[in-house]
Amino acid sequence: MENSKYLSVGALTKYLKYKFDQDPYLTRVFIKGELSNVKKHTSGHIFFALKDGNAVIRAIMFSRSANGLKFEPEEGQSVLIQGRISIFESSGQYQIYADSMEIDGVGLLFEQLEKDKKELAEKGYFDADHKKAIPAYPGSITIISSETSAAYRDMITTLRRRYPLVKVSMINTLMQGRGSKQAVIDSLEYADKLNSDVIILARGGGSIEDLWTFNEKDVSLKVFNMKTPVITGIGHETDTTLVDFVSDIRAATPTAAAEVAVPNVRDIAERLQQSDTFMMRSISKRIDMHKKRLEALSNYYKLKNPELLYDQQTEKLATLKTNLDTRMNVILREKRYQHAGIKDKIEYKSPTPMIGRYKEILNETKTRLDDEMTDKIRDRKKELSSTIELLNSLSPTNILLRGYSFTTKNGSIVRQSEELDTGDEIETTLGDGRITSKVTEVKNSDRE
């Protein structure tokens, strides 16, 4: 048997790869799908699978293309990919080599939704502390929905069946499509001014695009800032929108929202019946108890002989008075002892004796100081008189009055004849005046 007509696996794979690479319809393809099994290699390459409801294809994006992505690929994202289809020879599997990737329109919405959800959660908008309590028995309810929808009719039917006493107001609102976001916000603002006890924001099921108005951040913030409690019932039980997280109560469906908003009259009637039964039993028990107590009191021997009560209380009062008097005497005696002890301590520590001693010392000191001061003054007067007499005896005026005189030249006293020369003008001071003269001759006792 000839083997030449058989191809090896590698040759067949190479041939198929060649065909794939030469096919103009496979060298440039545009594919839409959901990311699955995303893995990013340390080299920067991204390995993943692209799937939809019918098929799965393996894919790879090399680092040169992955570095230009404007988002981080994650599991479940809906993306639009451009690339080429080829075969990986080692495994023989065909796969897409992605050159570019961007999030699909709906995928972009989901990405923004996740960002908004994360932001509001971090700010605490989902916390239970911000949830307003729903009245147990509301008097009025405002429904924001589409008046023609089956959801509205179901809610009205439920409210009338469960709690016909409640007053229901309807605000017909555009719930999907262009302009629905602002319409819902305006309706919420108007409903908040109606002073209703509860507001129900609800619509029936639909596609994610139909429900997207309730994933808008502005609508969610409006619901959060409402003064009136808000119950949301959006879509089916599996649908959860952003407003459901910020509303005061999230109901699975519009009908469930109506059930949450009001009590069931049957339950109320049952509770009233139970309360009535409980109260009747309690009253009967209390009546029986008081009857027995009354009978016991009526048979009490002291009540049959009231004077026994008086005598007993009189004796008890006398005993208490005696005990009180005894106790008061003991307390007064203790207080007198304490007072006496305090008085002795005060007298012992009194400063009066010390003050008397210091007064005596002060008087003695004053007398001594007065005597010393008198002696000092007398001695100083004697010294002053002696000094005055001495000064008078040495006074030039007194000397002059005794016949003496003194001569000055140019204001200076002349003490020796040699200080003068012939022709000098001198002044002589006497006891009764002055004489100005001119020297005509100078005789010195030492001169010849």
Image (spheres, rainbow, N blue to C red):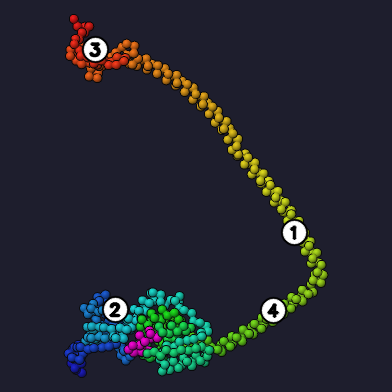
Q: Gap in Å between the C-alphas at discs 3 and 4?
A: 148 Å
Classify mark 3: residues with Cα within 10 Å, few (<14), some (14-19) or many (20+): few
Identify residue for label 1: 320
Q: Quadrant of residue 95?
A: bottom left
Q: Quadrant of the N terminus?
A: bottom left
Q: Nearer the viewer, residue 117 or 196?
A: 196
Q: Looking at the image, which residue is at 29% across and 87% down?
A: 33
Q: How far across and how far down the image is residue 281, in percent?
A: 67, 83
User: Looking at the rendered structure, which numbered label has been put on residue 286?
Assistant: 4
Q: In terms of sequence position, does the residue under pointer 3 or pointer 1 come before the other?
A: 1
Q: Are marks 4 and 1 in contact (CB under 8 Å)?
A: no
Identify residue for label 2: 72
Q: Gap in Å between the C-alphas at discs 4 and 1?
A: 37 Å
Give the magenta-colored segment's residue range: 175-188
Amino acid tagged 2: Glu
Q: Secondary structure at mark 3?
A: loop
Eye-nearest disc, 3 or 1: 3
Q: In terms of sequence position, does the residue under pointer 2 or pointer 3 come before the other?
A: 2
